[in-house]
Image (cartoon, helix red, strand yellow):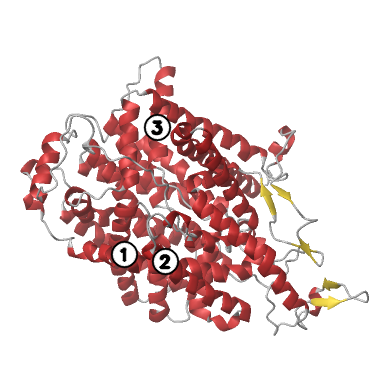
Amino acid sequence: MAASPAPTHDQQDAPSPFGPGVPPIPADATPEQKDAHWYKHVYQGDKVPQLTVRAVVFGGILGMLMAAANLYTTLAIGWAFGVAITAGVMSFVTWGVLRSLSGGRISQMSILENNCMQSTASAAGYSTGSTIATMFGALLLLEAIPEGKTAADVKSWAIPTSPIWAVAMFTLCTGLMGVFLAIPLKRQMINHEQLRFPSGTAAAETLRSLYSQGGEAIQKAYALVGGMAVGAVVGVLNTGEGTLKFLDKILHFRLPEQVPADGLMQIHGVKMQAMGFESSGLLIAAGIITRMRVCLSLMAGSLLLYLVVVPALVAADVQTPGSGWVKGATGAFSFDRSTINPDVHANLAVSGGGMFRITTWSLWGGTALMVVSSLTAVALQWKTIVRAFTGLGATGEGDSPSGQRSIEVPFGWMVVGMVPITLAMLFVQIVAFDISWWAGLIAIAMSGVLSLVASRATGETDTTPIGAMGKVMQLAFAIFHPGQIVPNLASAGIAANSASSSADLLTDLKSGYLLGANPRRQFLAQFFGVFFGTLAIVPIWFLMVPDKAALEKFAAPATRQWEAVARVLTKGVETLPESAKLAIVIGAAVGILLPLVERLAPSKLRPYLPSAMGLGLSWVVPFANALGFMVGAVVIFVWERINRRHADKYAVPLSSGLIAGESLVKAIIAMAATALGLMGMN
């Protein structure tokens, strides 16, 4: 998963995607005619302010905040959310407030300034942090705990596989790689093929609505801001006691972090893992955006795991000598850690706190399902992959009007930019991750190819297969560097981060294209945004996750998936219990079957088929997460039936605000607790 998909925005096809008053491009237009049409009727870049200092700085600051929020959501639920629309609305509203406070002395940002700000924010808030929590998180989880120490003693900044300089350099270079790889893809996929990039199209429509001062657009903006306020309050109220001392002093009411069901969910006196309901708006909001199909699959899979599979596994373990289970004089079983035989592979381990470590077993089947289904879905899109390669060099820069050639980003910029990036990435791979120079070059070259595929998938479906891109690299490096876990994860991180960065920035370039922005100036905004994002995400990561114990408190489904795949590819499945091996086989089979069934099924039946991603995720996240998602899906289901118009208008902005508000506050609290703890003040 890893990565995570951005929300899809359903838009009705308009006569022209460029807005009212602009004639649509003829269906049979040549690439040259398309360029000439855009330059004549759409381009506004020389007439309207765009790349201004205030747009870049404000966008960079917003992106830094969104980077923290996305890092938290990745750790909490395994997803990162696109920030373009959220940042655009936040900028519009915040700038309006600043103008009011200044008595009108500050001028309003132009629509292209706001688009430039949005591009900077996306590069800072999404493109730089896609694999911080997954790749470096997996490396931290894999770090062995020294004899006589605890997980809290394994500091994230002190482990040899993740020195601070390597994290910073890796993040900067992969983010910049995505920016430069987007240069040739933009002309082919956006200018000439006119791929939709649904989120980019939606962002452009949102900005047009805001600047037209339409009442509905303003209401959506206030819904997003209101959702952020509510999310922030929930994030403070459900903060655990002892996290921040000053909060303990001022908070007289708290929401419980989780409403447990301990009495109902125990087997032989041992509690189920996270079998309750989390008092978080984050999960509910994510369920509202995700909708019923995925959430119902998530809930069904989780119920199957906790109510059927887990009891069967425990029943097998209690009958296995050396598994830790002993039978008392009354015939009742109890868990005694001192009776464990290290040569016996029990199905379900029991933590020191007396709780089944369910996802430690179940993630193998869930991961196999998600990985194989992602790869199968990519394979079924073979036409997309073929078009990605055959269409790349179809037209050259000389085919465009001379005026447009002067504003498009030249191909030479990519060549000049990729040389130092390649050298820097080679240095990081060789020195920090012990990757051979030749394998490092292959990783960089493959990242370019996978970025191409991921970008086209985003343009056509609005979903970036980041997880699948990373797994392709992991499979390759299991051959190049067999048995070595760090090169395996590092290569996957390069592919995933550069692919997600390139696809996300093309989404922003689509917005700029529809609004008539200057491509070179938008490219520079994205370039600057990577530096803002790196400056923020690296210290945020080490503050939010100071040690292995802090990371283990998160569900971190995407991180654990990366860890699991790396373990299997480097150590072999023989270290797993037989039941986990069977779960891998079954998960892989279901991962192949579901995409095939979805492809062959009539379109009317597809919305009712189980979601492969939802089923796989249900065995990777705790039950409480699945329940939170399901509550959100039920909320939007009921809302749409009570008032479909209001649900369509407010659901996405309100949910986006809840996610941004709670995750941002939670990230700030986590960082503050770490910083104050280091200074001995908490």
Element type where label 3 sits in the image: helix
Marks 2 and 1, how far apart in space?
14 Å
Q: Which of marks 3 and 1 is in front?
A: 1
Q: Which residue is drawn at the image coordinates 80% and 56% (left, top)?
A: 263
Element type where label 1 sits in the image: loop
Q: Residue 81, percent across and down?
A: 45, 48
Q: Give the numbered dot on residue 381.
A: 1
Q: In this view, does 204 lie above or below 143?
A: above
Q: Name the residue under label 2.
A: 597
Q: Nearer the viewer, mark 2 or mark 1?
A: 2
Quick check: marks 3 and 2 in contact, CB under 8 Å? no
Q: Nearer the viewer, residue 448 or 558?
A: 558
Q: Residue 648, percent across and down?
A: 44, 36
Q: Which residue is drawn at the image coordinates 50% and 68% (left, top)?
A: 369
Q: Which residue is drawn at the image coordinates 52% and 37% (left, top)?
A: 641
Q: Nearer the viewer, residue 220 or 640?
A: 640
Q: Name the residue under label 3.
A: 91
Mark 3 Cα shell of 10 Å, populated few (<14), some (14-19), many (≥20) = many
Furthest residue toward top? 103
Q: Given the image, on which type of amino acid does mark 3 rest?
A: Ser
Q: Residue 78, percent across and down?
A: 52, 56
Q: Which of marks 3 and 1 is nearer the N terminus?
A: 3
Element type where label 2 sits in the image: helix
Q: Residue 15, percent across and down?
A: 22, 37
Left or right of residue 126: residue 162: right
Quick check: marks 3 and 1 in contact, CB under 8 Å? no
